[in-house]
Image (spheres, rainbow, N blue to C red):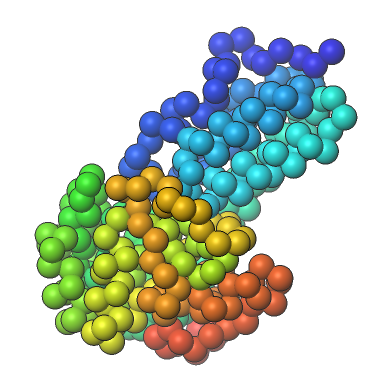
Amino acid sequence: MPASPRPGAAADPFHLLAADRTSGAYPLAEAALAALARALPKGRIDRPTVRRWALQLRRAQPAMGAILRLSEELGRFARSANSSLSAPRLLRWAKLRRRELHREERRVVSRARRALPPQVRIVTLSASSMVARLLASTPRSQRPTSVVVLRSLPGGEGVRFAAALRAQGLEARVVPDSRGPEEVRRADLLLVGADTVYGDGSLLHKVGTRALAAAARRAGCPVVSVTGTSKMIRGRPPRPVPGAGHFDRTPGSDISAYWTELGPVAPEELPLRFSGKARRTRSAPSGPPAGSDGG
């Protein structure tokens, strides 16, 4: 007989996750794994419960690629069991995934730092934790000369993001979203995070990214997304766009490169990435040579 969930565990362990509209993909994925660990019983858990949790997780944050991949893995666990699952096995999986996410973040920042040209003018929007970690970890002699952050409505998280960058010693200022096209014409790089990257090379991110990326490409400003492969989803994006009004989808034709833990990957190379054959690309701005850590 499968054990009952721990006393007080929510029928939906991800209900708090669904209400979070400010955290990025990595913090949300970590919160999901922590919530799962708290909800697990000590012995065995029935397959319908795991299947229900997989669906609830997907519904909680349908725009976050890392969440969708965790949901898919939970679903596979449920399908692989005859009647029940070992809860300790699920707990080990959750702990392993958290360690892998931490390792991926570190590797993304390390590889992106090698690709980031020194002393560039950057435009960004929203509040990507990966962009923040990359810029803060760049040696002071090679840091961007300026970072322009769009206010990023709805939500306006660009204001807090710019303040966080200034606290790290970076030159950052906030501008209205309407100034984005003008700012990218004077910039060297449009640098954004990612919520989901689809197999066709397109990017799901904060609403306003699509128009800003199109303006940057017209101005000859490279468009780069800093992301780990845990956010990459096979296949074409769904319609309508998940989280319409808060997110939009930028086509791969307007993305110069994805800076990942594998190094820079061009959008058209993503199908090869999913077959395990991704290779480096030179379509992104060039920084220090491979093997350098940016000084």
Residue 96 in the figure: left or right of residue 43: left
Residue closer to the observer: 23 or 196? 196
Looking at this view, name the residue that lies furthest to the top: 7
Specify the farthest residue to the right. Answer: 82
Q: Is residue 153 above or below residue 190?
A: above
Q: Quadrant of the N terminus?
A: top right
Q: Nearer the viewer, residue 28 or 272?
A: 272
Q: Is residue 155 above or below residue 269?
A: above
Position in image of residue 293 (x %, y %): 48, 79
Residue 188 appears in the picture as rendered: no
x%, y% of residue 140? 30, 74
- Snapshot quadrant of residue 118: bottom left
Q: Residue at x 39, y 85 (%)?
A: 285
In x, y percent, where is residue 289?
Answer: 50, 89
**Residue 214's image quarter?**
bottom left
**Residue sitting nearer the eye, 112 or 271:** 271
Q: Quadrant of residue 169?
A: bottom left
Does 265 appear above or below 14? below
Taking the view exactly as shown, the residue that stands out farthest to the front is: 239
Using residue 150 as the reference point, say whether residue 191 is left or right of it.
right
- Residue at left offset 62%, top offset 41%: 71
Identify the residue at image location x=62%, y=60%.
234
Q: Is residue 172 above or below residue 75?
A: below
Q: Residue at x 35, y 48 (%)?
A: 244
Give x and y (percent) for residue 61.
Answer: 47, 41
Task: Count how many numbered circles sit on residues in the image.
Answer: 0
**Is there any visible trace of residue 101 in the rendered image?**
yes
If the image is split into quadrants, where does the C terminus sit? bottom left
